Amino acid sequence: MFEKMIDPTAGPDVAAGDAPRLAERTDRLDGLTVGLLANTKQNAAAFLDAVAESLAEEHAIADVVRRTKLSITDPVPPDILTELVDTCDVVVVGVGDCGSCSASAVVDGITLEAAGLPAAVICSDAFQVSADAMAGLRGSPGYRYVRTPHPVASLDADAVRERARTALPEIVGLLTGARPGAVAR
Amino acid sequence: MSIDEQALAGLRDTLAADDYRLAVTESETGYQVTITAGPESCDDCLVPKPVMRSVLTSALGVPEDAIELVYPTDPA
């Protein structure tokens, strides 16, 4: 059963030992369309919505496209991937708040980058081991993502918004050419 | 065989966050690693076996084929 959830070696775009292959970045988010790729974990969508709200306030983004993966374990479905690629300039992915969904979120980030979209993946810090392991298996050791303290699922609405605000500089750093100061690795 | 206790502890902590436990026992050919689920665990939260094997290979200092990995849903 667990062998079938994700094939971590699947994916034609990365080879073992390669450095993470990242999409080209712009310097600013102003005027860009931001995709939000949420999973179904509690507070994942709320976290990403709070990120989008802050991006609108502070970075004048043009639009937001929201999509939800119905499986926390599987990579982004092809139809959603195509939609994001066709309609968005950058994508925020999250929240990896369990072992399998953190690994899956990292796969999604790597997949989006390979498709040409800058991505910022958010995982809770308790699952760094699984997120990093998946990045290595996908040929992207050292893949950078934003870590937020575990847990996320049990937070109330105000705490989720605060977490999102705290994570925002790192998210912006990953989505743009700026060098984020406190991302993993 | 040299176990990286720090890496193993990190894996235990990660599993515990999803209410899973890890037990490692030596076998004739390497190690048997058994994952058990606690009452608060969710079936979908455990990483796929290839991911777990990747972490265990590094933590236990042995090749993948020296690790017998048992998940909660595996047939007894």
Image (tube, rainbow, N blue to C red):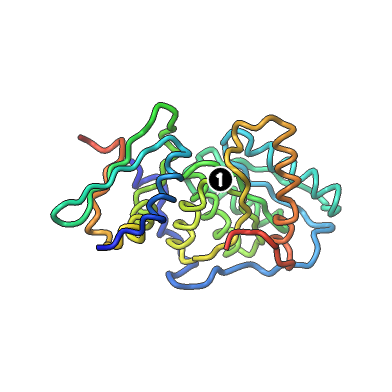
Q: Chain of mark 1?
A: A
Give whichever of A50, B25 is nearer the camera.
Answer: B25
The residue located at (17%, 51%) in the rendering is B27
Residue sitting farthest toward the front: B5
Residue sitting farthest toward the top: B39
Up the image or down, B30 lies above or below A95; here it is below
The residue located at (40%, 45%) in the rendering is B12
Question: Which amino acid lies under the numbered mark 1 shown in the image of this protein?
Answer: Gly
The residue located at (45%, 63%) in the rendering is A136
Q: State left or right for residue B65 relative to residue A93.
A: left
Q: Quadrant of the N terminus of chain B?
A: bottom left
**Residue A114, located in which quarter of the rendered image?**
bottom right
Q: Crowding at label 1, few (<14), some or many (≥20) Cα neighbours within 10 Å? A: many
Give whichever of A88, A96 is nearer the camera.
Answer: A96
Up the image or down, B51 lies above or below B39; here it is below
In the structure shown, which secondary structural element does the residue marked by tag 1 occupy?
Answer: strand
Up the image or down, A139 lies above or below B38; here it is below
Where residue A62 sits in the image (x, y, percent)?
A: 83, 52
User: Residue beneath label 1, please?
Assistant: A96
Where residue A84 sits in the image (x, y, percent)?
A: 65, 52
Instruction: Report the number of discs.
Output: 1
Where residue A23 sits in the image (x, y, percent)?
A: 64, 67
The residue located at (64%, 43%) in the rendering is A67
